[in-house]
Image (cartoon, rainbow, N blue to C red):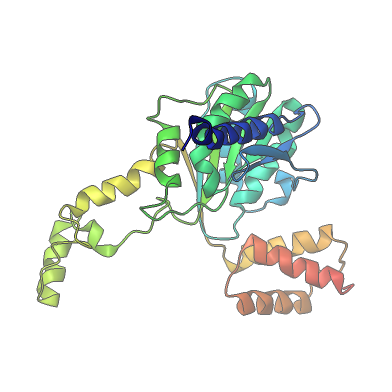
Amino acid sequence: MSSLEILLPRIERLLDRLEGTSASAVDWKKTHAARWIAESRRLAPIARPHRIEARHLLNIDEQKQKIDANTRQFVAGKPANNVLLTGARGTGKSSLVKAMLAKYAGKGLRLVELDKAGLTHLPELFDLLPQEPQRFILFCDDLSFTSDEPGYPALKAALDGSLATPGDNVLIYATSNRRHLMPEYMAENESAHPALWDEFRRSQNEEARHVGGEVHPGEATEEKISLSERFGLWISFYPMDQDEYLSIAAHWARELGARDCQSEAFTRAALQWSLGRGARSGRTAWQFAKDWAGQGK
């Protein structure tokens, strides 16, 4: 094989990389949100980003206060933390991040959405975004990892540990249904609660010494916790009770133009809707309100 034949594939890969970089240019004066396309290593503007006002997010006042204070500091050029929003599904984690864009876009805030496949490209974004005058939140929605996924060590290093650090105008906001972003197993708590585990072994008449071949299960637990603890701010969300769910459903029904939002029929229909989906949440309430208002009630 000639030297040219060896070099050609390398040249083609280099050209592809350069093309992706040039295509990543975004007019941030006109664009408020973009998506990182991992396959082509470029930023794609989002023409119609989902905007929601924080006033529509009910029963999460403490969570709103925490993320708003952090985002306000960030937009003002003051020190601020990376944020991990965790907890029950459908309770407003993603909507709250989008609400920050709606509130602060006029002051220079921009949102870049990336999925797990894009996490390995964080160093590239760290190089691109500090060149811009705006303030950027890298938004990772619904994160959850297995131990062998490449995005896990990439995010861990990006948060704290890598030589390639983000500029002062870049933060990471992530949402997850898991507090520590990875599945955890009962046996991994052995080192944290030895007395309970001694009792468990006696009751089961066996020795739970290993976890999937792991000789030191306590270290496995520490590894899983080590990612989430690199976020400076944790914001937790909790399941809603019936009254909270009904108040959100009524709020959205009114916003969508429905008039009959306090009747017994409305309450009964809203509860039946939540039972059919097995959840009482802001998302479920919003879905019900659309159905109720759409029927002209």
Q: Nearer the viewer, residue 141 or 232?
A: 141
In which quadrant of the rendered image does the C terminus lie? bottom right
Total count of labels: 0
x, y percent for residue 171: 55, 31
Q: In the rendered view, does 253 fall on the left or right side of 21?
A: right
Answer yes or no: is residue 92 visible.
Answer: yes
x, y percent for residue 196: 17, 63
Q: In the rendered view, does 139 fall on the left or right side of 34?
A: left
Q: Nearer the viewer, residue 268 or 231?
A: 231
> Residue at 87% of width from left, 74% of height from top?
295
> Residue at 43% of width from left, 51% of height from top?
181
x, y percent for residue 136: 63, 30
Q: Is residue 209 above or below residue 218?
A: below
Q: Is residue 293 above or below residue 141?
A: below
x, y percent for residue 217: 20, 54
Answer yes or no: is residue 73 visible.
Answer: no
Q: In the rendered view, does 148 fall on the left or right side of 44?
A: left
Quadrant hosting residue 277 = bottom right
Q: Is residue 70 above or below residue 63?
A: above
> Residue at 10% of width from left, 68% of height from top?
207
Residue pushed farthest front?
A: 2
> Residue at 81% of width from left, 72% of height from top?
292
Q: In the rendered view, does 96 fall on the left or right side of 185?
A: right
